[in-house]
Amino acid sequence: MRLKPLLLSALVAAGCTTVASPLLVPEALAVEGTIGGSVSITAAGSAKRAYIMRPLVPAEAIEEALTAAVQAAGLFDEVVPADGDRLLTVTLERLDEPEIGIDQTCTVTLAWRLSTGDRARTLWEERITTTRTVNSLDELDSEARGQLAIEGAIRRNLRQGIERLSRESYE
């Protein structure tokens, strides 16, 4: 009987994959303007695990991907670890993980907030919801389909957030 808990633990540990930050970085951003100055970036991820064998979305993965995307877009003069002229905070509020099936859809809501570096004033705030569906023609393996759906939904959200951020004026 002691074998069952050990086997279950081994299966859960084997499936504890996390979403990797390089896979979350959006490509081909349509940035309309720059903001300038320095920015510090923080993110809050999710440790939600709706199903066994589904990936976690750690804050570090979102923060690293967001930092890389902001740098690539050239929105700010520099990204600094702390005490930037502005603070960009992104919080994962909703993660609807895909259910096992032929088509797997993930829905993600990120709360975006750009504030002054001292957090005294909010300059821009928006909640963005994105989805991504991966079907069996894209990927045969069900676990990989779910992972691709999660990564794709977050990547789309980061793209939309950066593009919307670039359209505003922050005087």
Image (cartoon, rainbow, N blue to C red):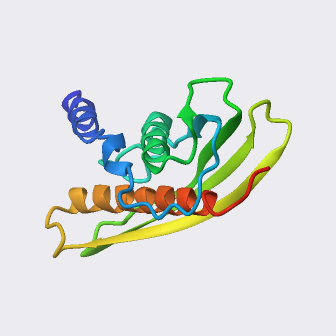
Q: Is residue 45 left or right of residue 138?
A: right
Residue at the extreme top of the image, as rendered: 82
Residue 155: image quadrant is: bottom left
Q: Residue at x 66, y 61 (%)?
A: 127
Residue 54 visible somewhere in the drawing:
no
Q: Residue at x 18, y 73 (%)?
A: 136
Q: Quadrant of the N terminus?
A: top left
Where is 93 relative to 116, above or below? below
Q: Position of residue 80 (x, y in %)?
A: 56, 27
Q: Position of residue 98 (x, y in %)?
A: 38, 64
Where is 4 relative to 92, above or below? above
Q: Position of residue 76 (x, y in %)?
A: 58, 42
Q: Nearer the viewer, residue 149 or 98?
A: 149
Residue at the extreme right of the image, as rendered: 120
Q: Is residue 54 left or right of residue 46?
A: left
Where is 101 relative to 17, above or below? below
Q: Residue at x 70, y 37 (%)?
A: 86
Where is 10 relative to 167, above or below? above
Q: Is residue 85 left or right of residue 163?
A: right
Q: Nearer the viewer, residue 58 or 119?
A: 119
Q: Nearer the viewer, residue 24 or 80?
A: 80
Residue 85 visible somewhere in the drawing:
yes
